Amino acid sequence: MTYKHDFTLILTLLYYTYMSNMDIENLCFFINIIVCYNNCVMSCDGTERFIFNGQDIGINVLDFWKFSYSDLNSDPRDYLAEYLVSHALGIDKPYNKEGWTLFDILYKGKRIEVKCTGYFQTWRTDGATSNIRSFSISPAHDKENNTYERQNDVYVFCLLLGTTRETANPLNLDNWEFYIVPTSLINEQCGKNKRINLNRIKKLGIKTSKYTNIKPEIDAIIKSFS
């Protein structure tokens, strides 16, 4: 397990203390806040043990992951899509895993938002599927300017194909389609709309991409920004 401490911010506080004569009690208060926050942002490898009264109770983080995320066609599918896009870009951990953010991945200074959907839904007990797939493109609140706008530069819309548990295997990357769209195009064509369906994406001229094309296509979009 590793912890990330923001020593730069702590050093800034020390300098501010020296320049402004802040008392030591208040300085310690602020440093404790920084350390406590960063202690909550931890990265586990699965071997960490749960303890009670100082004793190992026989389970670890990997056991929790198996319990919570073993069905990749359920809630973890969104996280899996983020992981696949991050891995394709050579990123070990998405930006949003350092805490809550308005976008998912920071890549070459650009903000990437990953959205996911699929035809097969584990919660549908009747086995029915829908051919109408849509993705959220809701604007978010920009506190600095007090406006609502999309807080990313690129969208990656991820579609898991297959209509049954057997055919919608998320571990087979041949079952995934990716649609990579500059946010500027979404803003221009969709305005303040909160969702966009797959047919609309295709009408924008966006072609489907496979896993190996994610990085070169995003690189090409970023290059077009300059």
Image (tube, helix red, strand yellow):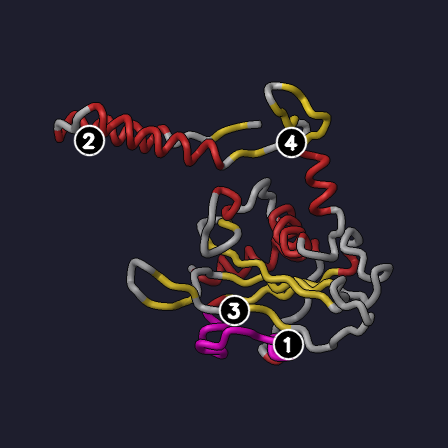
Q: Residue 202 has which mark? A: 1
- What is the distance, in whole Å, between disc 3 and disc 1 at their CAs? 15 Å
Q: Is residue 216 left or right of residue 139?
A: right
Q: Position of residue 26 (x, y in %)?
A: 22, 29
Judging by the rendered image, the residue that carries numbered circle 2 is 16
Q: CA distance from mark 4 to mark 3?
A: 33 Å
Q: Earlier in the sequence, mark 4 or mark 1?
A: 4
Disc 1 to disc 2, how far (Cα)?
53 Å
Q: Which residue is under mark 4? A: 45
Q: Amino acid at mark 2?
A: Tyr
| Mark 4 surroundings: few (<14), some (14-19) or many (≥20) residues within 10 A | few
27 or 225: which is nearer to us? 27
Label 3: state its secondary structure: loop
Q: How many marks?
A: 4
Residue span colored magenta: 184-202
Where's residue 60, x and y in %? 69, 30
